[in-house]
Image (cartoon, rainbow, N blue to C red):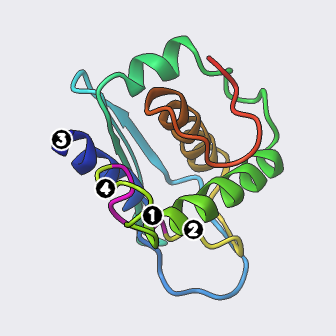
Amino acid sequence: MKNKLYILTLILGLILLSCASQKTTIPQKEALTSGSNDTIKIANKDLEYEVIIIDPGFNMWLNSMAYPRGFYTQSYLENKNRLYISEWNNRFLQPQRYSRNLYEMTIDYDPNIDYGYEVNYLIYNYMIYFQNNYRQKLWGHVPLR
């Protein structure tokens, strides 16, 4: 369980942002890598952010169970991510009610920054995976996949 906490920490420490308050668009210089150790990483050095998802089973789930890229619009993914991440951060602030093993740190997700489709797609799918795998319900209907 400690290992899963570390993994969740990495995913949710997934967005390291520059402190920009205006709407920003991420250039298409994103590097996406996937390894056999179930690590997915997206990095953009121009905006100083990095998304790292390390969770045993997520990569296989993503490739076998998630809807394909393009199924959802970017605005749909952004709206869902805002709701999921808001609830995640609320749970982090209530360690007496919610396990620190699941909610180890807050997620810095700024709705004024355009992270692009790929980042939002991976965050959304990780949130679905997390809710189904750890039997959590962050917000609304959670697709069973």
Indicate the secondary structure of the residue bearing disc 2: loop
For residue 95, side relative to residue 26 (left or right): left
Q: Which residue is mark 4?
A: 9
Given the current orientation, which residue lies at the most extreme front position?
96
Residue 70: image location, x then y, percent: 75, 30
Distance from label 4 to label 2 (Cα)?
14 Å
Indicate the secondary structure of the residue bearing disc 3: helix
Given the current orientation, which residue lies at the most extreme left position?
2
| 117 shown above or below 38 | below
Q: Which mark is residue 98?
A: none
* Dot 1 and dot 2 residues touching (CB under 8 Å): yes
Mark sitting earlier along the chain (3/2): 3
Mark sitting earlier along the chain (4/1): 4
Q: Residues within 10 Å of mark 1 (few under 14, many from 20)?
A: many
Q: Residues within 10 Å of mark 2 (few under 14, many from 20)?
A: some
Given the current orientation, which residue lies at the most extreme top position?
64
Whether residue 93 is visible, yes or no, is yes
Q: Which mark is residue 3?
A: 3
Q: Which residue is mark 2?
A: 109
Q: Which residue is mark 1?
A: 15
Q: Residues within 10 Å of mark 4 (few under 14, many from 20)?
A: many
Whether residue 26 is visible, yes or no, is no
Mark sitting earlier along the chain (3/4): 3
Mark sitting earlier along the chain (1/3): 3
Indicate the secondary structure of the residue bearing disc 1: loop
